[in-house]
Structures are given as structure tokens and as C-alpha cells.
Amino acid sequence: MSPSTTRPLTVSLKEIAIGDAQRCGGKASSLGELARAGARVPPGFCIVADALPYLLEANGLGRELAAAAAGLDFGDPNAVEAATAPIRERIASAAIPADLEAEILERYRALAGPELRFVAVRSSVAVKDSPISSFPGMMDTYHYVRGGADVLARVRECWASLWTARAAFARHRQGVAHERGLIAPVVQAMVDADCAGVLFTANPITGATDQIVIEANWGIGESVVSGRSLNDFYVLRKQSLEVAERRVARKTVMVTLDRGKGSDRLEKEIPPDRAGEPVLTDIQLAELGETSRQIERHFGFPVDVEWAFEDDRLYILQARRITGLEPAPGDPPEKGAS
């Protein structure tokens, strides 16, 4: 019996909770939990992890890909890239089974509406039978996607990104068998951000848990998370939300809609009259601070948050535990810690 006949292979984000990582990956389960907690999360749906094995089975690719994975030589990075490229190509060009395609397109049309709004297609990953539910920066995300054909193509590319050389190396370094890698693409309404960035509810440099650290730039957050831009930098006192430090950079590049193409993202220079302007107002800083405190309380640990403002409305695009955080001397123990 194929996976498609046992249960739906797509699910609304609002129906997903934090315990669903094995079915929906870490990103989707976090987004679903955020929405349940009251955060403003862009609406969307997840194509569950069972969908990729169904695609591979329908196209007779399972054994071929398993054999290619077994032969990877991690002592030679160029050989790994050469060996994984055909795997990605086979997945990206595979025919999506008709029932799965229809299910994805039905969800997309309901999300996009008659105005055919832009969506983002994001990768949500996990490891089978493991607490690992993210490989930050390893998988692909696509912005300003429009139309059913483009959505399907980007979903295939998300599935294929499970087999980038960097993703294969990440699994190898963590001792994770390749067949245990799960990926569940997320399709969400696109936030055409005026400004965006990242936030930490503990200082990732000093470990101080009484501070909130924010980086911000114009446009969508890709320029910030990729490290390609100079960003404004803020430190808030967590209890009072007062601004303890404010560094306004002369920002150089931003990422936004490629209006010449009418879709996809474009990295461009920031106009000189905006380059030195502060990205965030004090009102926006306070909203970010209060929202992030609520998220931290809900999850019970310090979080790394991706956020965006569009027309002065704050959207939360991701939240996950801060990795590698060392508590500062005198900090209280983390909730749930022994």
C-alpha cells in the first residue's frame, strides 16, 4: 500500500505541534507550535516526510540512490560533490505521483487565493528516530514563488537539497546514516518584508540570559542569516526591554523581490539615503522584545528567532533553541534542567 492511501501527505501548519518533528521536520513543528502559542506566523502547510519516499518509490529511485549514498568518499570533498549532484538531479526531475501533486496544488491554491499571492518554500528536516530536528543553513529556501508549476518545482528542489554535499557532510560528521534523513517541505505565505533579521533571547557571545540581542537589515532576512550584509545591532535588557546598546551600521546590500522578473529574490545595493538610517524604531524593538520573551517562556529555553516586519506587522518565521550557549555566571538554571 502506498503512503498516499494511508493518510494525507500534506497538513496545515496550524495542525502541527512541537512533537511532530518526525513527521514534519523541526522547522514545521516549531512553526506550528509558535502559531499555537499565539505568535503571528505566516499561514501555510507542510508536505510530510513520507512524501519523499513515496516519490522515490513511484520513480524507482530508491535502490539507485541508496547505492550512490553508500559509495560516498568523505575523504574527497570534490568526489562527494560529484557523487551527490546526480542524486539531486534525479530527485529534482522526478515525476510527482498524481495524487500527491493534486494534494499539494489544492493546498497551494487555497493558500494563494485568487490574487495568486507569493509563497515561500522552505525545507524542514529531522533525523529518523533521533532528537536531531535541524541542520541550520544546510537546506534550501525559496522566496517569492508564484504559480502551481513553480511551487512543485521548488518542492522538488527542497527534497533534492537533502542531498547537497554540505548536507551529506553534516550527516557524516554527526554519524547519521543517510537513509535516516527526513525532509518535509513547508509552503508559506510570503512576507514581503520591509525589514527583517534575527534575534536571540540570550547573548550568544557572552552567554548572558538577561539580554536580548537583535540584528536587522532592510528587505527580507536572507541578507542577515547569510552573513552577506552589514546589519544594525541592538541589545535590550530583557526585564525592562530598555535599549542597552544600539549600533546603526551603514548597510550595503538587501534582499527583496526581483521586480524586473516579477518573482524570485534579488540582492541589491541599499540606496544611499537609507543605508545609514536605523532599521528599527523603539516601538518595533519593544514589540520584538516582548514577543521574544513570550516565545522563550512558551518553549522554556533561550531561543534564536527569525522575524520580519511588513507594513508594521511583526511576523515570526522561525524559532529554535540557541545552540552552544554557555550560561553566564550567576544565571538561573534553564527551565527543566536538572
Image: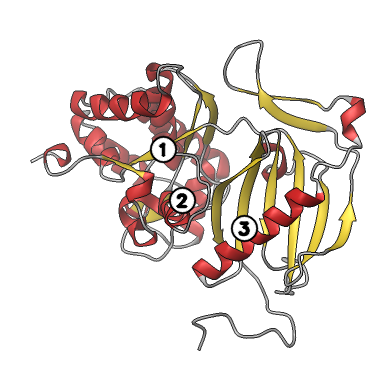
Q: Nearer the viewer, residue 258 or 139?
A: 258
Nearest the viewer among 41 and 120 is 41
Element under disc 1: strand
In the image, what residue occupies the spot 85% across and 33% down?
Answer: 252
| Residue sitting at the far left | 1
Tell me, for residue 35, which label it has, or none: none
- Residue farthest along the top direction in this orientation: 260
Q: Residue type at mark 2?
A: Leu
Task: For marks 2 and 3, give the one nearer the viewer.
Answer: 3
Task: Characterize the local packing of mark 2: few (<14), some (14-19) or many (20 or more) Cα atoms within 10 angstroms.
Answer: many
The amino acid type, in three-letter code, at marker 1 is Gly
Foreground: 54 or 188?
188
Residue located at (51% from left, 24% from top):
118
- If the image is split into quadrants, where does the N terminus sit? top left
Residue 291 badge: 3
Residue matched to label 1: 44
Q: Number of numbered discs present? A: 3
Q: Which residue is mark 2?
A: 31
Quarter of the rendering containing residue 9: top left
Is 236 situated left or right of 276 in this image? left
Tell me residue 303's x, y (percent).
60, 63
Does the CB distance between marks 2 and 1 fall below 8 Å? yes
- Vertical relation: 224 (above or below) 321: above
Residue 322 vs 330, above or below: the answer is: above
Ranked by sequence position, the earlier of labels 1 and 3 is: 1
In three-dimensional space, the C-alpha distance between marks 2 and 1, rounded to whole angstroms, equals: 10 Å
State which tag comes first along the sequence, 2 or 3: 2
Left-right relation of 247 to 162: right
| Kind of residue sitting beneath label 3 | Thr
Given contact means CB atoms under 8 Å apart, are the residues at marks 1 and 3 in contact? Answer: no
